[in-house]
Structure formats: structure tokens, C-alpha cells
Image (spheres, rainbow, N blue to C red):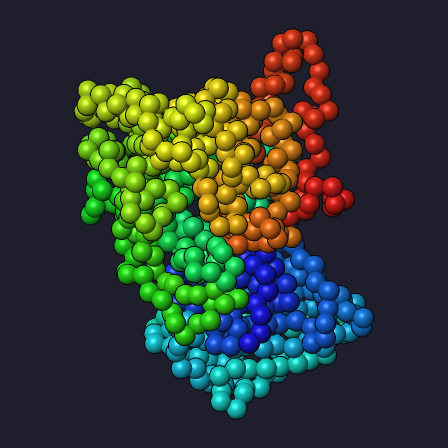
Amino acid sequence: MKRQPRIEDYAAIGNGRSAALVSKQGAIDWLCWPRFDSPSVFAALLDTDSGGTWRLGPAEPARAARRYLAESNVLSTRFDTPRGKGRLIDLMPVMDEEAKRHELVAEHELARYFECELGELDVELLFQPRPGYGRAPVKLKKLGALGWRLEHGASLYTLRCDLPLEPSDDGTCLRGRVKLRQGQRVHCLLSWDDEAPAVLRPLEQYVPLAVARSVSWWRRWAARCTYDGPYRAQVVRSLLALKLMSFAPSGAIVAAPTTSLPEVPGGDQNWDYRFCWLRDASLTVTALHDLGYADEAAAFMSWLLHTTALTQPELLVLYDVYGKEPVGEQELEHLDGYRGARPVRVQNGAARQLQLDVYGEVVDAVTRLVRRGHALDRDARKLLAGIGGYVCDHWRRPDQGIWEHRRPPVRHTHSLLACWAAAERLLELHALGALPRIDVKRLVVERDAMSHALRTRGWNHRLGSYTEVLDGETVDASLLQMSWYGFEPASHPRQRGTFERIHERLEHGNGLIKRWEGAPDGAFGICGFWAVQQLAEGSGTYREAEERFERLLAHANDVGLFAEEIDTNTHRALGNFPQAYTHVGLIQAALALEKRRASDGERRAAAGGDATASQRPKKPVPAGARPGDGAA
């Protein structure tokens, strides 16, 4: 069995409906169609023998270097061999709605082309589809000039390529090889259609057009970003990653486009993240709105109201992209798993856990939108009033908490904090006139009771810190959110003390922070960025926050993407990839740094001083570049 590339050796492409992972060697090892949580077409990421792959690249060993074109999700990989140099372009084409109205397009497409830029290259293709997580029978059919076809249930896959292809003896894969000289290209287009005639475009003309049009579409979208600080490249790349994980037809935002990439190398902490967690999505929407993407925020609000209509005031932890509860968690025993990490899971059993922090995160996100002028309709007001009653009734219950522990529920301090935030924000919405009909008296009583419990049972005088659980002796990284919700200012001695205990017990160098004491050797990506945010908001100096931020940026892969976790020993990526939560944390930290820099500048200006070198804007660091590596 061939060993899979490292997680960080992949890059993501997508179109707002699904996403694919492409390795540095030009292999598409993960693709689910027609949507994020559909069964895979290619899954060599989880099993190199039976998962399926599609490779296009040099036939001989080559050095690879890659980047995204401009501010887009169109991937460019350059290969350098002793005989020549070439470039591979990968994308899922996107276009504006006006173009869609005037053109026939396939429901889903994945386009690729390889161009020889210097000398000559032997280029080879391996097309090995394995629908249904590798369990469906495969029989590729030749259609002459119309390419090759694969039928799986109601799905019709059509591959066209101007490279001559030959089927294997059993008809389950295709291979091709051609010599390219400078300026010559090979074009490929894979399309998916559902119970309808396939839409087949002129290949040589359409693929370059799709590239140009897609780059233009992504660049226009990225240009709406209102952040223009020294880390714009990283912020925009994070925005583009989040957009990749947004399901355009409904407004849902998935946590990651993959399943079962392990949190522990070779271990069993392997979960399906191709769903919309209300927690992650709420924070994502806040980040998008803070950077000028009001349309995406409004789309999520519409999705949220539609999704929760049948369960209000109760909220599930996660939903599928159309707002339905995922079916029961399953294990795919026929797949070997990423580098032997088993089981491979699809669906997610956390959907029915009680995680009380979800209520606070949803209400907080809605409140932040209202502060910026978003109006609440009758359905939204009904949802929020129901949440208020639910939180008042249930905040004393033990739950599984933000980290979704699969163990008996306990009283998590962070969950209580989020319930307090829900009550506090609902009262704010009432004061703003946005939520006139709520039980104000009860919310005030329960909010004050929550505050008392946090300050008496959530605080440990001996440790000088808030604790992971009420009356506890351990800390966890979610306590860094005390200042995010406004319960404890970052500059307050209690919050500074909490930061120090987290630093002592959970930090493992380079700004890497684990989720809780005794957690495996994986630092959770967003936790490090929470620490940057707290330092920037008052627990430390601007210099301390900025230096920590830049150390964290060094853990992005070569195209600026982050996984869920970082191995504290090897500094390799762990967990599902790319991870929305980590990129949200990066954006929040960058915004906090910019706010602190501006406020420090105002204070210095008022005092008649000048900015120090560490507080002046730096030359932007390209996304994916390591600080100090000389990249420009």
C-alpha cells in the first residue's frame, strides 16, 4: 500500500458546493460530489488502494512549487525536471449568475490543464474513479469524441481529455502518456450530471476560459475585504478558504471538506467534519461580516431560521448543508484510513450531544449583526425569544462542552459562560428595540445567577484562574474566550491569571496551545489565535501579540492553509483540512491586532509621541510564507 502525502502537502479547490484536495504531485486524492457530504469519487486520502485518485503530471520525478493564482482558489503547481519545466492548473470553475443564465453548464465540473513551459516533458495521466467511498462497481465506457463515461446510480460522470487514454484490462481506470514541448498543453474536464443529458463544452477553448473567468470571479469577491492591514495576504487567504467551505445553495458553512483525518497519528480520533456546526458557522459569519461580507452573513441567517424551524427552541449541534439532522454515525471498515488511522467515519454522532455553548454563540453572532444594522424579522425574533427561555431552563445542566467529549457530561465553565452571553446579548437586543417581546425579568435574574456561579464556582483562588469545569482544578483553552464575550476584560487580573495558567499547562512552544490538560499531542489551531487575540485586547503588549501571531503563521502550509491541529512534536498538520475554525481564529486575531495598533497609535498621538518600530505596519507577509524566509 502506497503511503499518503502529509496532510499539509494538499491544497484545496472548490466552487461553493464541494471541494477537492490536490497533492503536490498533481493527484486529486479527495473529491465528494455533488456536495460536501456526498460519498467520495476519489478517496486515496483515506485508502491508496481502493479509494481512487486522478493524477496529472510529469512522468519523471520533479520538484514541485505551488500557489493560488492572484487572490483566487485556482491552484497553480509548477514542476521542475532536468529536461523541462511545466505548470498544472486545477480548479472547479465558477461564474456569475448572469453568465449562468446565458450558457449551458454542467452541474459540477473539475477542470485541469498541464502546459510545458520550457524544454520538454513526458506527461502522464491516471484516472481511477471509485464512487461510493470505493464500494461501487466501476466500468468506464468510451464515447468516441465525447470522452469517457461512468454511471453510478443516477450520477453521470464524463471525462474528456485531449491526451490519448487507454483503459485497464478490467475497465476500472484510464492511463495516458504524451510528450509535450514548450508551449504545448493537455486539457482535461470532468463533469457530473444528475439524471440529465451531460453538457459537453469545446475542451481546448473552454478550459482556458474557465480559468480566466474563475480567477476574475474570485478576485472580485476577495476585493470586497475591508481589512487592509499588514497581514492582508493571510486574512484574504483565510477568507477564500472559508468561502470554499460555504455551501452556496443554502448558506451553510461546513467545518471542513474532509472526514477522518486523524487528530492523533494512527489513532481513532477520526471524525466527519463535512457538516455545519452552529458554533463554527456563527463565528465564521461574524468574521465575514466584520470584513464586509454582509450577503454571506444574511444567507447564513436565512439558513439558520430554516434549519431550526422544526426543533426550536432546541438547537442541534450540527446539521447537514440543507439543515437536516445527519443520520447515524457509521464506520467504513473497508477503508484503511489515513496512514492507518482507523476507523474511517461518516456522519457524526455529536449531532445529538448537549452542547450549551451553541446557544450563546448563535445569539452573539446575531447580536453582532444587529449592531451593524441587520434587521430581525418575526421568525428571527421568535427564534431568539425561544432560545432565551431554553437557556434559562437548561443552563444548570451538565453537557459535553465545546470540545465534544464522548464521556459523561459535566458542568463546563465555557458552556456556562456562553449561556451568560446568550442572556446578556438578548437583553442588549431588547434595549436596542430589536427584540421587544422577551421575559426581561427572568433573563436578568438568570443572567445574574450565571455570573455568580462563574465567579464563585468557575474561579479557583488557589490556581488564580478560571477552570475547565465548575469547582475544578484544571484549565482548558476555551477560557480564553472570557474576554471575547465581554465577561472579563482581557486586562483584568483574573483573565491575566487565567492566561498564565493556560500558558503554563497547555502551551508547547511557537504559540501552540492544546485544548485541555491531558489532551493528545495536537495543538488546536484556533486556540493559539485566541491567545493572540487576548494579548492584543489587553493581557499583553502589541509586540507580544504580534510575535506570537507570526509564529503561528509559520505553521500554515505552502499555500496558506491550516488544518484543525498541529502536532506539538513534529509540527505537522493533524485533523481535518482545511479547517474553517482555524482560519476564523486567524481573522479574529488579525483584526484584534489592527485594533490594538490603532488604539496604541491614538494614545501616542495624544501624548505627542511617535510609533515604535514594532508598532508600525510591516511589509505584508505572503500567505503561506514563513516569517523571515525572504518571500515577497
Q: Which residue is outermost to the top? A: 607
Rendered image quadrant of residue 37: bottom left
Camera-nearest residue between 335 and 595: 335
Residue nearest the observer in this picture, 454 or 344: 454
Rendering coords of residue 443 (x, y %): 23, 24
Residue 221 lies, in percent from the top left, at: 53, 45
Q: Along the line of sight, which residue is nearer the eye, 593 or 503?
A: 503
Look at the picture and state if 50 lies above or below 231: below
* Residue at position x 50%, y 67% in the image: 340
Residue 33 shown left or right of residue 438 in the figure? right
Quadrant occupied by the N terminus: bottom right
User: In the picture provided, is 140 more to the left or to the right than 512?
Assistant: left
Return the x and y of residue 596 as percentages of the image width and height.
57, 24
Q: Which residue is drawn at 47% across and 64% down?
A: 341
Q: Is residue 511 visible?
A: yes
Q: Quadrant of the C terminus?
A: top right
Tell whether 250 sits left or right of 12. Answer: left
* Residue reaching furthest to the bottom: 169
Q: Quadrant of residue 392?
A: top left
At horizontal 34% and vertical 42% (from top left) the residue drawn is 401
Specify the farthest residue to the front.
462
- Is residue 16 in view? no
Residue 176, by quadrant, is: bottom right
Q: Is residue 509 above or below residue 416?
A: below
Q: In this view, does 412 lie above or below 265?
A: above
Q: In this view, does 420 lie to the left or right of 485?
A: left
- So how many labels did they put on this image? 0
The x and y percentages for residue 494 are 45, 22
* Residue toward you, 523 or 538: 523
Residue in the picture at 26% in, 23% down: 449
